[in-house]
Image (spheres, grey):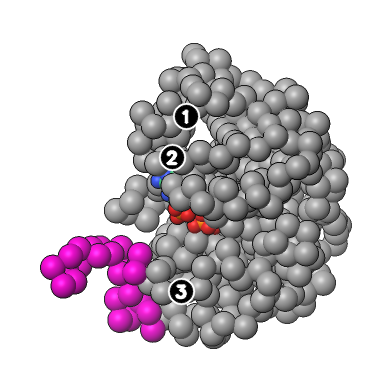
Amino acid sequence: MGKALIIGAGGVGSVVVHKCCQNPEVFEEICIASRTVAKCEALKAKLDGGKTKITTAQVDADKVAELVELISKEKPDIVINVALPYQDLTIMDACLATKTDYLDTANYEPLDTAKFEYKWQWAYRDKFREAGITAVLGSGFDPGVTGVFSAFAQKHYFDEIHQIDILDANAGDHGYPFATNFNPEINIREITAKGSYFENGQFIETEPMSIKRVYDFPVIGEKDIYLLHHEEMESLALNIKGIKKIRFWMTFSENYLTHLRVLENVGMTSIDPIDFNGQKIVPLQFLKAVLPDPAFLGPRTKGKTNIGCIFQGLKDGQEKRYYVYNVCDHEESYAEVGSQAISYTTGVPAMIGAMMVLTGKWKKPGVFNVEEFDPDPFMDALNKFGLPWQESFNPELVD
Ligand code: NDP
């Protein structure tokens, strides 16, 4: 059916490549491109010989000219951006220049400020509409599946959704005293930033990790959850009819938070450059270099993730609650694609989002968040491609 250019060959990129190769009717051809071409070649060596034709390329995705040259040469039907959030705008510019559809899994972040908002990418709406191409923003798990779950709840179960609690739990254990489950720099920027939640039309800012609850998750049991800011709240606040409150919760263990607190207190999580032996270094980037590479956590990680959304609202004048979630097993993910569940739960929806565009189900000119499309074919594909979901109509609520 089509060809995808996959930019980024890290933890998530690897899963996207595996999943595209499991779906050769849609992904007849893929080109894996990244800064370090050896990682692309290693993936090709692992997966070559199947029905999907694989090529590789070296690219610096910070440079629009290099991207335009690559896209013009490869002529993909869609670019799947699983590099870092810093590259979103350069890749979108190159897609505009070559009139190619675009998909990513994380909102653009400027390198020098940890800001999680869509304003930079939403500014491309007119340009994409006029060029007649589609951009799908945030097609990972959260953001991504959480937005699809919201559209699904709105379409099938509610007249009005008043509250969404997004719950992201990782009960995995990799055996290291401290490691992050995806890119440490991106992850630590996110969780050391101020928290926030949406209530009655505005975002209320909170101190980092200052709001804690305990939640008894299906399958994985009781966990400490902390309120964080998360980018999908911004788009859901606009796209879900009648919404009054949205909160995002993530699990962290006491051990993880103690390490993080120490690293913060000694200045290791700072993104402000410092002088070191006559050279400028960013402490957080140095920390990333000494922490375990999340791409190699796979073989060590045991346990499961549980990510989903609890909705409260009205149906036919009656109050209603609904919980939809996916449970993903780290060891099963590793056995299937050689990556742990965090990369798996991001890479599978990225492939499915690209499949939605290539098959024409999510093809319309402009820049969109996932909840702006029909959720049904995506929900079916989640069941088919390794992220089956479960429902509960009487869930415990987060107080
Ligand atoms: P990794 O650090 O493992 O991989 C990033 C890849 O991008 C690497 O291959 C890296 O190359 C490449 N890259 C970085 N900079 C450039 C550049 N300038 N030009 C070309 N390639 C570049 O990250 P992850 O795989 O863990 O994460 C990928 C994305 O997924 C991130 O944007 C992250 O925010 C997002 N994510 C989204 C989630 C969701 O649920 N929505 C959850 C988890 C992650 P090199 O090997 O040379 O460093």
Question: In terms of depth relative to the viewer, which is nearer, 312 or 239?
Answer: 239
Residue 90 percent coordinates (x, y): 40, 35
> How many C-alpha atoms fall within 10 Å of the one at disc 2: few (<14), some, or many (≥20)?
some
Residue 399 percent coordinates (x, y): 66, 69
Q: Nearer the viewer, mark 3 or mark 2?
A: 2
Residue 220 percent coordinates (x, y): 77, 74
Q: Are marks 1 and 2 in contact (CB under 8 Å)?
A: yes
Query: Which residue, given by chain and number where applicable, does mark 1 sit on?
Result: 70
Amino acid on which disc 3 is placed: Leu
Write down the region rendered in magenta.
262-286
Q: Residue at x 70, y 61 (%)?
A: 338
Q: CA distance from mark 1 to mark 3?
A: 32 Å
234 horizontally vs 303: left or right: left
N-term mark: 3 or 2: 2
- Above/below status of 273 relative to 164: below
Given the current orientation, which residue lies at the most extreme left position? Answer: 278
Query: Which residue, given by chain and number where applicable, does mark 3 sit on?
Result: 291
Kindly tell me whether residue 216 is visible in this rendering. no
Amino acid on which disc 1 is placed: Leu
Q: Are marks 1 and 3 in contact (CB under 8 Å)?
A: no
- Above/below status of 166 relative to 139: below
Q: Quadrant of residue 172?
A: bottom right
The quarter in which the N terminus is drawn is: top right
Label 1 residue near ligand 1, CB within 8 Å: no
N-term mark: 1 or 2: 2
> How many C-alpha atoms fall within 10 Å of the one at disc 3: few (<14), some, or many (≥20)?
some
Question: In terms of depth relative to the viewer, which is nearer, 258 or 283?
Answer: 283
Q: Quadrant of residue 284?
A: bottom left
Label 2 residue near ligand 1, CB within 8 Å: yes
Q: CA distance from mark 1 to mark 2?
A: 8 Å
Query: Which residue, given by chain and number where applicable, does mark 2 sit on?
Result: 59
